[in-house]
Amino acid sequence: MPAYAIEPTQIAPQVSGMSAATMSTSPITAMSTLRPGESRRTSLASTPSVSSSSDMRTSKAATLTDPHRCHDGTVTDDAAPLPTLDDLLATARVVALPLVTRFRGIDVREAMLFEGPEGWTEFSPFAEYGDQEASAWLAAAIDFGWTAPPLALRDRIPVNATVPAVDPDSVGAVLARFPGCRTAKVKVAGGDEPLSADVARVRAVRHALGPEGRIRVDANGGWNVDEAEHAIHALAPFDLEYVEQPCASLAELAEIGVRVKYMGIPIAADESVRRAEDPLAVAEADAADLLVIKAQPLGGIRRALRIIEAAGLPVVVSSALDTSVGLAMGAWLAASVPSLDYDCGLGTASLLAADVTRDPLLPVDGAIEVRRVLPDPALLQRYDAGAERTDWWFERLGRAHAVLSDAAAAAAAG
């Protein structure tokens, strides 16, 4: 059962009353930037600690350990035991990072970072998500911080540019932040903007990329079926690679796929995977041609890989507007997927006006590296979210941890 399908529980008592001021003195032990095949122990041998306030193809012989219960309730041979809440809070820091351009209705992205035995990791469900949904994001953070990642099959991940709902005159400046990217995802169906604004934006992107560039559009479920059909017809002359989540519901997604099938434009599912009680339902219903897969919302790299294998559809690995620490998780997921047929949506550090590291995962020649990321203590301090927001995140962490604890207890008892 997915963690976000579990009934929420009350906040764990040990987090209530714990203030930002109390936690801001937690030490940060720096972990060196690791790349595929590099041992953390070897790297740390030559890297001093820093204090601040703040494969699916992996050989069983190489990875077999005692079975553990996974944080989403399933049993695997590679899931770390659930850390205590105190373990998570010991190095937790909350940041508020400004965006270059308003995106998803926000101007600032908040995130919680903490360090596990394998390195730094991120917990950053959007503020409006409930505790059940947020618990999957926490499971992902724990998976990445407490368990060695799968074997990386590649060390660089081709990525797309992401174009928010900007006016056509701003498209060039946005694309310039994604050097070497020959694919662009363009946001459409935003707010009260007319379809003509979406058409103008996509036209500007096509002009900038030229005929060889690839364009995908993302409606975030903002159209009904009739609106989606009309919009896809209007945007089709710009040679779309695919349309992502044109409609919100599974039934609508299946219907629009039937209506536009003759046009040869694939339909991708995002929210119908990452926010669904059953992330495989869209594949089983034959409602999409490909899936957008995000590590954090799906409970981590291993669970996402199991979903990819079970779905049997092409995938695009994407991010949820993460910091570079969270993007590292997504990059390692993309590196572990046997077949990667599309550029990935993992270049979104370019949408941030600030990051938590001096070496962010920004696109270079159209790709990002597969490596862990080391937060910089001074940047964590500079972009600290403040006492009130940090307390809010600490309490949220406690509630999400309680959901995972209850799930583990129920699975053990059952």
Image (tube, rainbow, N blue to C red):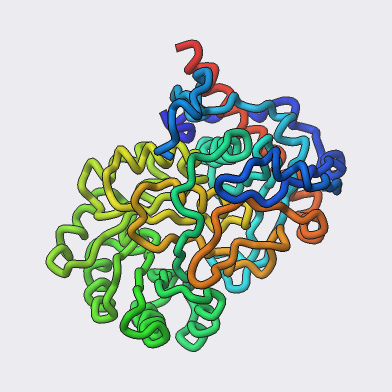
> In the picture, which quadrant includes the C terminus?
top left
Horizontally, is 371 left or right of 298 in the view? Answer: right
Q: Is residue 82 visible?
A: yes
Relative to residue 40, is residue 9 depicted above or below? above
Q: Name, please, the residue furthest toward the left.
A: 262
Residue 121, image x and y in percent?
Answer: 64, 44
Relative to residue 90, is residue 174 depicted above or below? below
| Most foreground residue, 129 or 407 | 407
Residue 348, image x and y in percent?
Answer: 54, 64
| Most foreground residue, 8 or 145 | 145
Relative to residue 149, is residue 317 depicted above or below? below
User: Residue drawn 51% across and 38% down?
Assistant: 136
User: Residue drawn 28% across and 77% down?
Assistant: 235
Residue 400, image x and y in percent?
Answer: 60, 34
| Most foreground residue, 49 or 100 | 49
> In the picture, which quadrant includes the N terminus?
top left
Toward which corner of the image does residue 263 lie, by quadrant? bottom left
Q: Is residue 334 visible?
A: no
Report how many numbered discs are placed on residues in the image.
Answer: 0
Horizontally, is 29 left or right of 82 in the view? Answer: right
User: Residue drawn 46% across and 65% down?
Assistant: 159
Residue 251, image x and y in percent?
Answer: 23, 49
